[in-house]
Image: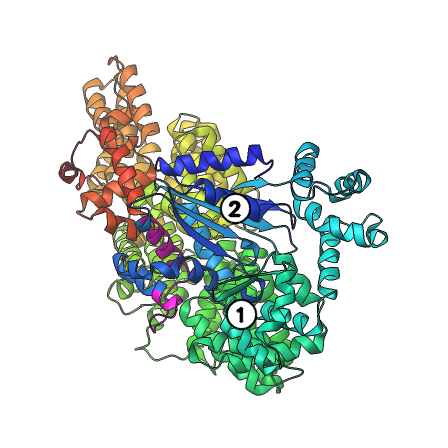
Amino acid sequence: MFIGRDQERERIAEVLSAARAGRSGTVVIRGEAGIGKTTLLEQIASDARDMRLLRGAGVESETELPFSGLHLMLYPYSDRFDALPEQQSAALRSAFGLMPGTVSDRFLIGAGTLTLLSELAADRPVLCLVDDAQWLDRASLDALLFAARRLSADPIALVLTVRDTARPFPDHGLEVVRLGGLDRPDAEGLVAARLPGLTVPMRERLLDEAGGNPLALIELASALESQPARHAGPLAVGARVQEAFRLQLAELPDATRLLLLVIAADGTADLGVVLRAAERLGLGAADLGPAEEARLVVLDGERVRFRHPLIRAVTYQNAAHHRRITVHGALAATLDGGEHADRRAWHLAAAATGPDENVAAELERAARRAGDRGGTAAVAAAYERAARLSTETEGRARRLVHAARAAYDAGRPDDATRLAEEAAHLTGADAVIAEATFIRAQVAYERTSPAADAALALEGARLIVRSDPEQAVSMLTEAVWSARDAGAHDLVRESVELLRTVRIPSSSAHAPVVGGLIAYGRLLDGAPGAVPPLRALVEAARNGVVDDFVERIIAGFAGLLVADDRGATALLEDLAAQARTQGALGWLPYILEPLAIGRLLLGDPHGAESAAAEGLSLASDIGMDMQVTALTCVTVRLESDAERSRALAADVRKHADLHPTNAALASWGLGLHDLADGRADAALDHLDAVCSGPARHDLLIRAVPDHAEAAVRAGRPDLARAHLSAFETWAAATSFTAQVSRCRALLSDGDDADAHYRTALDLHGDRAYDAARTRLLYGEWLRRRRRRSDARAELTAARDTFARLGAGGWADRARAELEALGDRPSADRAGDADPLGRLTPQELQVVRLAAAGLSNREIAAQLYLSPRTVGHHLYKAYPKIGVTRRMELARFVSVI
């Protein structure tokens, strides 16, 4: 009989009902030890017998074994791996030790988990229950939470229980149901049902002291009867329950307590392993009898487990240190097969009484195996423990810096900094100190500022610029680009000066990067000679000469800096496709940021919105906070709701002093919104800050024509000329002169203005958005000069182009000008002329890929969604764009 928890059960029932109807849901059940989380989980399982049930559990002793939790849940379905996309299948097989190989991206296992769950839900709804999720190994937890956050239109429910501990649990973005104590009537009902023989005084004391904790109600009763004095006072409920278990353990024979310690230290629940280890200690199966009679353990075939996780914790924590060492040594000797190498290494480490190089080497090998499988958190733990067991200082420092790198890769910046600093203090080796400094630099980007990152990366590069020039280039690349983000031109120049001294072969893949970064230093000073090397970097990346992800992303940015928009965007499109093919999911948010900007600059707001939304979704799901901020800056310009756009920008601009380039990008977006809406004074304020700020010679040089337009419309032609000289120099060097002619037209009168507008239109070529902006200004100028027919032609063309491109604000401005000419207000808005504008960003992304001929499964693999979610997006998209069949999407290929 299940007592109480009516509200909680009702909410879980709603989640299960939604899953049965094809809507995924995840719930985290939180509470203190003994509060009834496991019992509630069992009741949920009982209520969902029509669903496919997947069970998992975290085990404290296995938190350092990568994918041990996921293995328990998904290994029974390894025969389904063949149905997954190749990269995802290979990643799961490698993670589970089913095939050799290296996982290219730790997040790929989460994508494989997502797809496998969707595959399992194809024939009936799936319910995943994970108990004690706070003890899941980090690799398994990351994979499960990635899947949970990206499940949508699948018949899948995921329920995790989490005990309140000092170990933080990443439940942000997930629904949390907190279990408190049972109310008094339910607590009385539980006591009456389970402990009918209690006296009234004892029952009342139990109800008062247990605080509604079900485990306390059950376990404290006998303890209160036998030794009431030991349980008096304000001891916390959890501590009271643990004390009750300690008393039960103390009454067992010594041999039984030692055998229970073997079970607690083992973690596999494999009775054969436990008994073989026990035999080495002079124990036998009969010694388990008293623990069974006391209901402390449960035997289930070849498995043995504690009745409650707290019993395991008390058994292990209450044992003398020398007994733990003895037990771990016995388990290490028992686990002698290759398949047990990782567990053996950790048992050997637990049995070590001092530095031991042999054990350290075993752990280092375990770290390498974990790295091949994508378990970066486990890599960090194994290297750190190996460092503690190292017998020589240099070996300890080397292992600590490996641990620091793995901790950074696992998203644990505090641990990464701590380990890197310790490694650097232990050694005088330049290579180790440089790597430790580089790790601290990368943490500083997120935790402090891009400028702090640049300064530290530069410091690390100085140490190895002669001994390891290739690595020095990587560090200086970080330094230059982080300094760029910070608007720290002094750090850019220092880094560039050091780059000039690097000696690498001209055939090196780094050579174009070095040339491009040195050229970027000149670009900041407005030097036109910077353009050819930066364009050469784009070409080298497109031709495969530069093949590093970081350097190719920078090459994409470099193309945008020198108006090679098509080359840069093509490079970034190819890079995004490659990242998807290779399963390099962690790189995609970095690629999608400049890709969104490139699409914007080419006049493709739909494509930009799609890329930015995909990047934001991924970055948020995998905890890339800084990239969320960077992509939000792009989204400010894309957001159609003005208030929402201002709110996004305000959030970003709070940190403008640390991230001026990002903040300026957001301000540019706000300025354009205001300009399109006719708020010239407000637009001028935003754009003047952009064009005067530290990023003015960077990508934001391209905001100068918008600034000039805002100044003229605000009646300040004097301000319109403030930044034109720098823009004209840049435009001449990049052959991006159409907007120079537009600016000159704005600042001219009569025939000169007319000629400049026509020149601009000739120079725009196939840049439809830029041409429409010029036509709008030209049409306004023609209307003021009463050339009504000419004005109508230009304004109509501008309106139609803006509407087709989905630039609603600009289309409205053109429409208002046409109404001023006496044209009737048009009933159709931008969304009617542009059916793609009715789609959400993710629907648009799915439609783009479907129009290109990809199947739902192929689209799902590219976007890290489930195939069913892809089908759901298409189902929602079809009526919005007026199609009924997939083949009709072909007509949108030229548009998207």
Do callouts 2 and 1 mark residues in contact (Cβ within 8 Å)? no
**Which amino acid type corresponds to the residue marked 2 in the rendered image?**
Leu
Q: Is residue 97 magenta?
A: yes
Q: Position of residue 134 (x, y in %)?
A: 57, 55
Residue at 21% in and 35% down: 758
The residue closer to the viewer here, 817 or 614, is 614
**Residue shown at 67%/65% (left/top)?**
315
Camera sees residue 453: no
Q: Is residue 170 visible?
A: yes
- Secondary element at tag 1: helix
Quadrant where the image shows the C terminus: top left
Residue of label 1: 380
Magenta-colored span: 93-118
Tag 1: amino acid:
Ala
Mark 2 surroundings within 10 Å by alpha-carbon count, few (fewer than 14), some (14 through 19), many (20 or more): many
Can you name the residue that lies furthest to the front here?
Answer: 197
Q: How many marks?
A: 2
Residue linked to disc 2 = 41
Q: Position of residue 405 (x, y in %)?
A: 51, 69
Of pointers 2 and 1, the one earlier in the residue sequence: 2
Query: In this image, 499 relative to 737: left or right?
Result: right
- Is 734 rendered above or below residue 495? above
Residue 742: image location, x then y, percent: 30, 37
Q: Nearer the viewer, residue 845 or 501?
A: 845
Gap between marks 2 and 1, in whole Å? 32 Å
Say which mark, if any, is on residue 593: none
